[in-house]
Structure formats: C-alpha cells, structure tokens
Image (spheres, grey):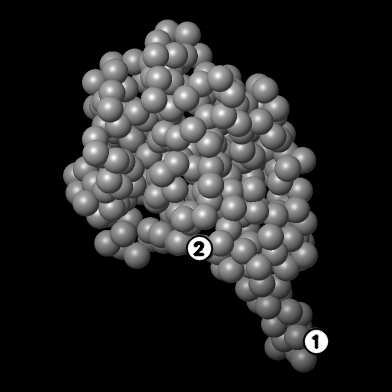
Amino acid sequence: MSLTLSAAVLFLKISLTIAYRPVFIYHGILTGADSMKHLVNRIQEVHPDTVVYNFERFGGWSSLENAWHQVLEAQSNLKAVCDLHPEEGINMIGYSQGGLLGRAVLQTYPDHCVKTFISLSSPQAGQFGDNFLHLIFPSLVAKTAYQLFYSYVGQHTSVGNYWNDPHHQDLFEEFSIFLPYVNNRIISVNSTQFRDTLLRLDHLVLIGGPDDGVITPWQSSHFSFYNETFHVIPLQDSVIYTEDLIGLKTLQESGRLHVIERENVHHYQWHRTNDVIDDVILPFLD
C-alpha cells in the first residue's frame, strides 16, 4: 500500500471515529423549537458537524393537545429522520413534557433507530404540584385539579394525560388514557411492545435535580413518585422497577440505565446552561 493511500485510509478511520450521530430534539410544553436553539448551538459547537433535527411541531398552546395525538404525529417525524439514518441510527433528547412524549414515541415505534434517549427533566412518573400547574392553569390548585383532569374533558389535554394525584389513584387508573398505559401500570395489548422498544436502546439517560422547581416531585424525572402519604418512593423500590414493567430494571442490570442528579439547576436552565449541557448531555452524544 502506498504512503498516500495509507494516509487516506488513516484519515478515513479517524473521520469515522470522531463522527457524531445525528440528534433529534423534542421541546417542552408551551414553547417550541426556538426554545431549544441554545442546546442545538452548543451541541454543534462542541461536536462539530453534528446533524440536529429540532422538532418544530406542537409549539405554544398546541403543546396542550392530547398526548396520544402528539405522540402519533411526532412518530411520523421521527420515522422520517430514521429513514435518513438507517445504519448509524440517531440519539434523541426530550426536554420536560417532550421527554415524556418522546419516550412514548419510541414505545409506539417498534423499529425506531434511536440509540441513546436522554430524558431531560421530564415527568416520567407523572406530575402533581401547584408550581407547574399555575404556569398553565392559574386558577387550578393541585388538590382539586383531579376534578378536571380525571374527566372526559380533562383527558383532551396533555397535562391531564399525565397528571398523577396520589390521593385519587382509582380515578387516575379509571380516567387517564395515557400515563398508566405507557408505564404499563395498566396492561394492554401494547404492553409487550412498550417494554421491548425501550430495551432496543443502548442507553436510557434520566436527568433531574432537587432545585428544578417545576417537575413535582422532581424525582419523577427518575421514574420515582409520591405514595399516598407524599413520601417519594425511590426508583429501585417502585413497582415500575421491581416488576420491570417497561424494562428499567433490565436496562439497569445491563449497564444501560443512567440516573443523573444535578443540584442548583432550575427547570429552565437544563438546556440553556453550557456547563450543565457539557456535563450531563454531551457525554452521551457519541
């Protein structure tokens, strides 16, 4: 092999080594793709030439539409991206509500191409708290919000679809058409698929922290939640983990589940602060 050809082969190997997978980003509630531009820019600054798909649909008030509607529509966008990258696959980041809905997109897409899914301060076990509620429904309080959310009308809103009232679990299971199903708390014809699609991941990264101020309890970002006395049940003691309902225990035992806690980060700073992005997001974007 000539020196020139050898150098060319070496250059190709180095290029392949430092190439980064494309990234699909799913924004949070009441915002849109514009709110994720700092994260997009930081990824491309530190990981040059990364292709980033910044999900543009369901911005603003349309982010309150029924969760299943958003999930099934977003699935078509993710499929289009996967069709462009069938070999190398992609990584996916879902922020806040987008982390929960993005996870459900994977669960309803058996042949997804996502290698690493990063859930960035997302209510994976549900939401229950006044701070979050008053951002969207100023006149509601958490104590009585179940009267709206656990109804036919309330289930037309994304928030109602993952509102999880510890004092009204019977109504939660009776009326909620989304969260009990994607978490396999209620067994359905799709339960096996909902678990198997998450087990296709190389890595599931759950990021949250005690100073979030919006996700309540903040441990919901780690699939932990209140019991009836408002004590937070740790992930490893929760039914979703011990019974391996969606594969979290299997992912943990195979070294593919990463639970990250970061202090002194408010909810709106996870995707807007460089040192946080560099510390808890970029290491998982190979």
Q: Nearer the viewer, residue 139 or 155?
A: 139
Disc 2 is placed on an element classified as loop
Q: Is residue 176 left or right of residue 58?
A: left
- Specify the amino acid type for callout 2: Arg
The residue carrying pointer 1 sits among few (fewer than 14), some (14 to 19) or many (20 or more) residues within 10 Å by Cα, namely: few
Residue furthest to the left: 243
Q: Are marks 1 and 2 in contact (CB under 8 Å)?
A: no
Estimate the spatial distance between the alpha carbons at disc 1 and disc 2, rounded to whole Å: 49 Å
Q: Quadrant of residue 167?
A: top left
Q: Quadrant of residue 256?
A: bottom left
Kindly identify which residue carries mark 1.
4
Q: Position of residue 185 (x, y in %)?
A: 26, 32
Residue 17 makes an appearance in the image: yes
Q: Position of residue 146 (x, y in %)?
A: 39, 19
211 vs 276: above or below: above
Kindly identify which residue carries mark 2.
262
